[in-house]
Image (cartoon, rainbow, N blue to C red):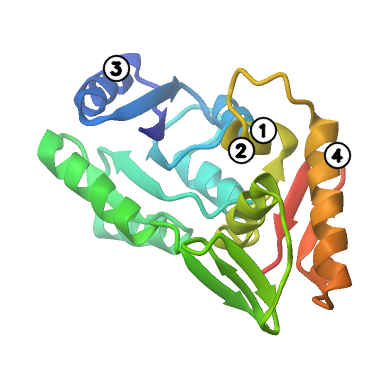
Amino acid sequence: MKKVLIVEDEKRMADLIALYLRPHDYTCEKVFNAKEALDYIENVVFDIILLDIMMPEISGWELCEKIRRFSDIPIIMITARDQQEDIVKGLKIGADDYLTKPFDEDELLARIEAILRRQAPKAYLEINDLIWDKNQFNLTFKNKPIPLTPKEFLMLGHFIQNPNQVFAREQLIELLWDFDSETEGRTVDSHIRNMRDKIRNAGFPIDDYLQTVWGVGYKWIAG
């Protein structure tokens, strides 16, 4: 199931959007202001954000800009504002799409599905002779295999597929173990350390790409 974060200060509208989406295999979390949204995004992995513009204290525009400083997660702005300049502004600051209220349920679903199709993770990735091949479950550098554990392999792929996005240890635990796992942050650190050592020893400059964000987690720097 795909995870959706609904950021909407009107509870009735947030409930309505969730009601639309849940029968179509989406799980929805609802927050009612930008500060709540940032807390969620920094600690929980979502597939897409539905973002209202007109919110108290911090607007949807400001929130979109803040999110884009650390994440490429897809964002659809949903708002009653339908002026052309508002749409252009939203797209320029990083929104992927824009939907005006009132909207049709089928149109909302179609727009979400279109964005998620474009965001579908790739099974084959190459960075300066480092090849991550999910179909073969194989990592090589200059055609020489690098033996990673399954968790290390999937973690590396997730970083490469989401360049410049910071992942907290808690997010990585949720992604690679499960939400109820008793795995701790130091286990993630151990996997990262072992993965770096193996790739570094193979000759690839992993430290130029996989970087530690102190006090938060890790991110992959796009070349």
Q: Is residue 126 above or below residue 19?
A: below
| Mark 4 vs mark 2, CA separation in Å | 20 Å
Indicate which label's residue lies in the foreground, 4 or 3.
4
| Mark 2 vs mark 1, CA separation in Å | 5 Å
Asked whether disc 4 touches disc 3, contact meaning CB atoms under 8 Å apart, the reply is no
Image quarter of residue 24: top left
Q: Which residue is mark 2?
A: 176
| Mark 1 vs mark 4, CA separation in Å | 16 Å
Indicate which label's residue lies in the foreground, 2 or 3.
2
- Name which residue lies at 55% across and 29% down: 57
Please give left or right for residue 88 compared with residue 65 in the image: left
- Name the amino acid type tagged 1: Ile
Please give left or right for residue 11 compared with residue 160 in the image: left
> Which badge, 4 or 2, is on the more N-terminal residue?
2
Q: Is the residue marked by circle 2 packed among few (<14), some (14-19), or many (20+) residues within 10 Å?
A: some
Q: x%, y% of residue 121?
A: 44, 58
Q: Which residue is mark 3?
A: 15
| Mark 2 vs mark 3, CA separation in Å | 30 Å
Image quarter of residue 54: top left
Please give left or right for residue 162 compared with residue 3 in the image: right
Q: Which residue is mark 1?
A: 173
Asked whether disc 2 touches disc 1, contact meaning CB atoms under 8 Å apart, the reply is yes
* Residue 147 visible, this angle: yes
Quadrant of the rendering where the C terminus is positioned: bottom right
